[in-house]
Image (tube, rainbow, N blue to C red):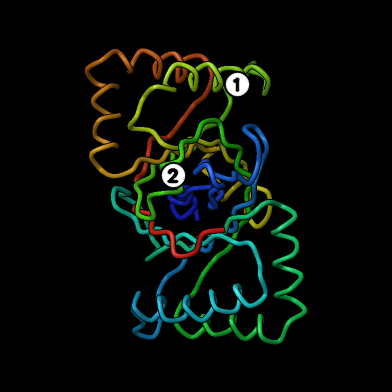
Amino acid sequence: MKHWIAAIFATMLAVNSFADNHEPDWAVKIGDGVSQTVHFCKLTNGATMEDIAKLDVQAIKWLDEERLRLGIDILTPVFDTFSDYDYISLQWATWNEWGTFWSKISESAEGQAVMDSYSSVEDCKVMVASVFPIMRKPEVIEDLNKVSTVEWCSRKEGVSSDQLSAKHLEIAAAIKDDTSVIWWGVGYPQIGAQDKDLPGDFYHYMSYTDYAGLAASKHKVANEEGWRMLQDYYTSYADCNGQVAVSVNTVRQR
């Protein structure tokens, strides 16, 4: 479960409609949390991702008919030495929307049928988290195919939550002009995961338009003094276990 969870949060929690001025209609304000329901899945009975894609079409049709605001991303591991899942289905919404969705699923025969249709082709474990956006750019919505990294961390002894949050905002201000990073949030597990399952107390999730963007960010760390900021964070604020990377395909926008 640790390695499944470690790869999870490669996903975008931004909200996905545009206003007339082409500015995103974000789900929440910076600093407010949104829900992520994460399905860590292994394919069974000879099923393929093509089978999952066909089921996703039926699920999305039902969501559209019920006018439920729920975004869905499909994540596949790329750089994760210990991944023991085939893919991750990530559903994200505001917490109010999350409640509406699960109420509808539990009360609707059609919704139950949609959920049950997946059981013959995959075996999944599920958890729910709150993720708090720190910085975001419109590209996170415009690009349906993205790359994300995840890093699990725990606060160092003597560091308060307020001190940690202030440090995150300081880093966000320092990298706001970095065009390679299009989204960064910090997530905290809420439901479905116990402490023994988790590699840390919270996780960083950063997204990039593509692998060139990820490479540009790593170049800044290695060759343009970016490592100093990371060293300060790791030395004084949090113990972290290293990044994993996943490819992200958005199949339904919120």
| Picture coordinates of residue 195, whole percent (x, y) | 62, 46
Is 103 placed above or below 1 here?
Answer: below
- Which amino acid type corresponds to the residue marked 2 in the rendered image? Val
| Picture coordinates of residue 219, whole percent (x, y) | 23, 25
Sequence-first disc among 1 and 2: 2
The residue depicted at 71 percent of the width and 58 percent of the height is 97
Left or right, 218 with reference to 252: left
Is 108 in front, or is 119?
A: 108
The residue depicted at 60 percent of the width and 42 percent of the height is 131
Left or right, 91 with reference to 247: right
Judged from the image, the secondary structure of the residue bearing numbered disc 2 is helix
Q: Residues within 10 Å of mark 2 (few under 14, many from 20)?
A: many
For label 2, the residue is 140
| Res 219 label | none
Is 141 in front, or is 239?
A: 141
In this view, the mark in front (1 or 2): 2
